[in-house]
Image: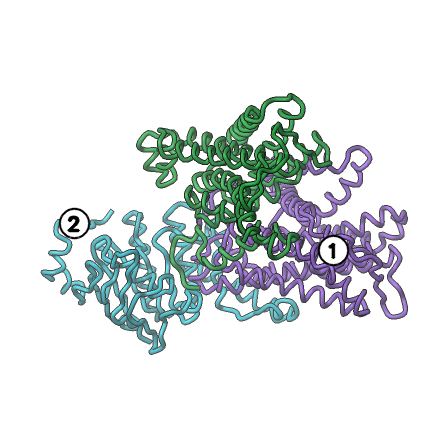
Amino acid sequence: METLLQHLVNGLVLGGTYALLGIGLTLIFGLMSVVNFAHGEFYTLGAYAAFAALALAGLPFVAALLAAIAAGALLGALCERALLRPLRGHSIDTIMLVMIGVWIAMQNGELLVWGGVAKSIPHPFPTAPLVMGPVAIAPLRIIVLVLAVGLIGSAWLLVHQTKLGRAMRATFQDRDTAALMGVSIGRVHAATFAFGSALAAAAGALLGPVFLAYPSMGDLASLKAFSVVILGGLGNLTGATIGGLLLGIAEELGAGYISSGYRDAVGFVIIIAVLLLRPSGLFARQERIG
Amino acid sequence: MTLAISELAVSFGGVTALDGVSFAVRPGSITSVIGPNGAGKTTAFNAITGFLRPTAGRITYDGAALTGLRPSAIARRGIVRTFQRTSVFPSLSVADNVLTGLHLSSNAGFLDVLVRRRWLVLEESSLHADVDEIIAFVGLGHRRDEMASALPYGEQRLVELALALAARPRVLLLDEPGAGMTGAEKTVVSGLIRKVRDQGVTILLVEHDMRMVMGISDTVIVLNHGRVIAEGTPGEIQAHPDVIRAYLGATSGPA
Amino acid sequence: MMALGRGLLAAALLTLPFWLADPYYLHIAIMAGIFAVLALSLNLLLGYTGQLSLGHAAFFGIGAYTSALLTLTLEWSFWPALAAAIALAGAAGWFIGRLSLKLRGAYFVLVTISFAGVISQVSVNWIELTNGPLGLPGVPAPELGPWSLRTKTAYYYLVLAAVALSYVVSRRLVGSRIGRAFVALRENEALAESIGVDVTHYLVLAAVVSAAMAGLGGSLYAHYTRFVSPEVFLFSYTVTMVIMVVAGGKGTLAGPLVGAVLFTALPEALRLAASWQWQMLAYGLLLILLVFFLPRGIVPQVVASFSGHPRSAPGSKTPLQ
């Protein structure tokens, strides 16, 4: 029972950051129909930005997080402007290929800049775990969970309480009508991509210190983000939040009770299982036989 | 050889699109299905050709049930449809479009394709001859090697028709063949439809252009709110009080 | 004219070990050949049915492991092991095809990636079977009767035969009603169904043939490098295959071949000038540039400029959006 609680707590911490990844991607994938294979690379970017801020510049933790968010938002906006906007209206395959190109380029760029050796990201918190009853949790993880929840909350606020959020929701539901009502689709797209990438970077900055930073960490992050999006439904913020938490808990339980080697396979299996049991992918508008 | 629909019902998302529609299409006739927008005409087409699963009812052709079969199986039984929105294979030439449409004219499977070279060569050249014949029939010879999506609208719809004909239908379902066409184009299409019928193909069409409908149909079936409200010759339908009431004020005139 | 060109090419390929005797170049030729088989296999899915499989390395890896394990632990001879590798990879392709029946576009891609991910995890963790990250060394060289195909020259001819076989199979498929059905389901699925193309059947067929061909490539790779490890599932292999097909020209038959030769020879040529990280970085940028400036790939562009008959804007909206 104690280990179960421990796994659940660990799973929540992971899940919180997965939710951030998922929220970012569900907005991008859902609103812009962009299959963002580079999403994980923004996660990596965030981790390295945090590394630079913490290890090289000696900034406080929250400042490092903000630096990561800024880096994600900026690079995201740049990507959208330079690559996605000119290709708007092109087939999904074309956009997929471009994002794969960004994926490869970013990852190998990170490799060249930072080297292939995994980096430990220093953090200012004590390492001794706090023991609360049956559960032991490192202070870092508490901070990560708190910040993740805070960021998820801000994402919710942005989408549901601001004018931009309203514009985003309108564009998601019916782009043409939104445009007719005066919504600047271009600006919504730019903001969405920047915001989604910023969230991914935040997730990287939060999880990086918990584990390690290495250039290919984004690969799994991308897949897990897709997993969360598929679980929660395209464009569904609630779904992404819950899905992220579920994935984190599932991974921890799987690693604890089944085998730690297969922990990363949980996300893959979810993707396959969900897509299998929900036969009409979201691109099939008509209900079809066979 | 009769296509028969019995108590066909289709609902989705709480909307009842078809509410117990029954009719039979007389072989060798041109039968039109008309009705105000939202009457369920295209839904009926989708259900007949397997693109929609009906909530209730039976569709049979030649006595054998069609309900539950996938569209390609229904096509193999000889029932072929066109679509309301222009549907061609966009990046293929007109000739390649029609050649693709001749899919059902051959049975060559994976092993045949790999091994039986000489037989295949003969078959392919016979298919190419068929392509020329069909292209000539619809009058697109001058556009043979042009990319389908680059053609003007009216000609693209002729490519659609050529595709459907290539599938060697016994019953041809045309979904608004005259939509968006000029008067001259509609005359051409009407002529083609008659020629196809004269070759023994049964035609079922959905159309809004009343002049076109009344001009070529043997039988007219009127749908409203998912039900058949009248069935008869064009003359009978034009005088039918229920039909006039259903269309109250809304006439789809010619272009 | 074309026939003369083809004849010369064939003659050159058949006599290659004699005029390109340096073992290093032969090695490049062999690797190019193996990747040509892989590129042709991916091209069937990507170029004809229009489905992007980013998990193609899974089929490659399944072929490699099957062949290696059968010859190593069960002491099968090469040829039945090769057949088994092709069959098993093909079965995996059938599984993916059936799994993804209703999935198109991005969802299909995700399933292929996930499948590759699961298989990769299995190969790392199921140590009793695969020896985990340590891999399987000492995979035996093939034998043809009394002769061992251990030398580079002999292996070159084996690979050349495989490339020829893959090319012929692709060509016959593509030029037949099966190939037309593939293209039809890419261009307009509903329309394809309405004229009698059973979309499910053809999608699965494409997946099976494509996977089986990749399995062939995997087996050839295993018996050439004589070592198989979970590294065969590395995403960089898939990426390389995708670049070869997209840059060479998807939907053509010469495209993947050109792509395979180019992207096997180039990295080797650049090896002294730049590390592989720079190359992969360049690949990423190249992919982006290709999408913008050369979306149909090299071969169609070259053909178009020779015949002066440009087709309309590629990569633009398809009707199924």
Question: Which residue is located at x 75 percent, y 63 percent?
Answer: C67
Depth order, front residue of B113/B14: B14
Asked if residue C150 can be seen in this view, the reply is yes
B56 up-or-down from C314: above or below: below
Chain coloured cyan in the rendered structure: B
Chain hosting mark 2 = B
Going 58% across and 23% down the picture, which residue do you hit? A60
Quarter of the picture holding the C terminus of chain A: bottom left
Q: Is mark 1 on a helix, strand or loop?
A: helix
Q: Where is residue B46 drawn, in percent x and y?
A: 34, 61
**Cα–Cα span, label 1 and label 2:** 74 Å
Dot 1 falls on which chain?
Answer: C
Q: Which chain is green?
A: A
Q: Tag 1: residue type? A: Gly
Mark 2 burial class by Cα count in 10 Å: few <14, some 14-19, many 20+? few
Please tell me which residue lies in front, B194 or C65.
C65
Q: What is the secondary structure assignment of the residue under circle 2?
A: loop
Query: Which colour denotes chain C?
Result: purple
Name the disc covering residue C132, or none.
Answer: 1
